[in-house]
């Protein structure tokens, strides 16, 4: 079987993303205990975080862009991708590595057209039907959400649980990351389902020592 150069490039990108999803930090200003988000991110990356999503719902666009540029500056030398939640305009402004979109956000086709073929696009999948539908989409990973109920985000669908996550991993053709209730106690069983990684919010953002918290999740 002959694989074209384009096919080889796509396979290399998929392999890289599977590795980068291993420990995915999603920032949360409210859970950061008043501390500088850039500091939390830097400490978490030193502890082993492999991808960072900047999620901001309460600051204006100018401040969002400034923070995005700051994070890109510290993440780029470490080879850790910067993903912007929802805001394709901010991702373009800071030349981020990609965006993460939800089911009710900008359609992935529009995001792909604006960002081009080389940027990362992640999509939340909140039930098995959405996991199946995502197989036809030109995206780079799915976030199976939520695995467990969590106080971090209350406007979510019913939890997948471990069996639902295992089924989602079996169904999807994309790299996958689990989000919702991820911490040191839940991570081992979640990773045993075959999912490529875990997306962590409070277990790192609210930790007294974000570096140690990140390192503990990789054990």
Image: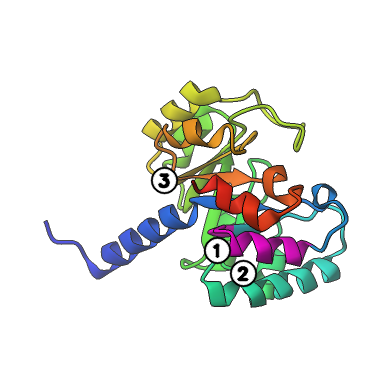
Magenta-drawn segment: 37-51
Is 109 placed left or right of 61 in the picture?
left
Labelled disc at residue 113: 1
For the residues labelled 2 and 1, say whether their Cβ atoms are less than 8 Å apart. no
Counting residues from the start of the chain, the first of labels 3 and 2 encountered is 2
Q: Residue drawn at (60%, 52%), measured in percent from left and top? A: 214
Counting residues from the start of the chain, the first of labels 1 and 3 encountered is 1
Gap between marks 2 and 1 measured at Cα: 15 Å
Magenta highlight on residue 12 = no
For the residues labelled 3 and 2, say whether their Cβ atoms are less than 8 Å apart. no
For the residues labelled 1 and 3, say whether their Cβ atoms are less than 8 Å apart. no
Name the residue carrying label 3: 174
Q: Quadrant of the N terminus?
A: bottom left
- Nearest the viewer among 204 and 29 is 204
Predominant SS of the magenta segment: helix
- Nearest the viewer among 120 and 33 is 33
Q: Position of residue 24 (x, y in %)?
A: 57, 52
Q: Is residue 38 visible?
A: yes
Labelled disc at residue 96: 2
Q: In which quarter of the view is residue 2 placed?
A: bottom left
The local secondary structure at tag 2 comes to loop
């Amino acid at each position: 079987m002959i694989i074209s150069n384009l096919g080889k490039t796509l396979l290399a990108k998929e392999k890289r993303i599977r590795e980068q999803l291993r420990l995915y930090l999603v920032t949360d200003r409210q859970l950061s205990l008043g501390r500088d988000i850039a500091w939390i991110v830097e400490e978490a990356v030193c502890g082993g975080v492999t991808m960072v999503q900047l999620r901001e719902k309460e600051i204006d666009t100018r401040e969002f862009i400034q923070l995005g540029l700051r994070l890109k500056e510290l993440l780029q030398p470490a080879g850790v991708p910067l993903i912007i939640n929802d805001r394709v305009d901010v991702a373009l402004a800071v030349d981020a590595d990609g965006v993460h979109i939800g089911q009710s956000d900008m359609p992935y086709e529009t995001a792909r057209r604006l960002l081009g073929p080389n940027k990362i696009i992640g999509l939340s999948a909140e039930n098995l039907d959405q996991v199946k539908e995502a197989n036809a989409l030109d995206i780079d990973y799915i976030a199976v959400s939520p695995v467990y109920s969590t106080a971090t985000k209350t406007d979510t669908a019913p939890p997948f649980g471990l069996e639902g996550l295992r089924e989602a991993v079996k169904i999807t053709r994309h790299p996958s990351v689990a989000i919702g209730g991820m911490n040191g106690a839940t991570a081992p069983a979640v990773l045993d389902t075959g999912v490529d990684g875990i997306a962590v919010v409070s277990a790192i953002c609210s930790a007294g020592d974000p570096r140690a918290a990140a390192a503990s999740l990789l054990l």
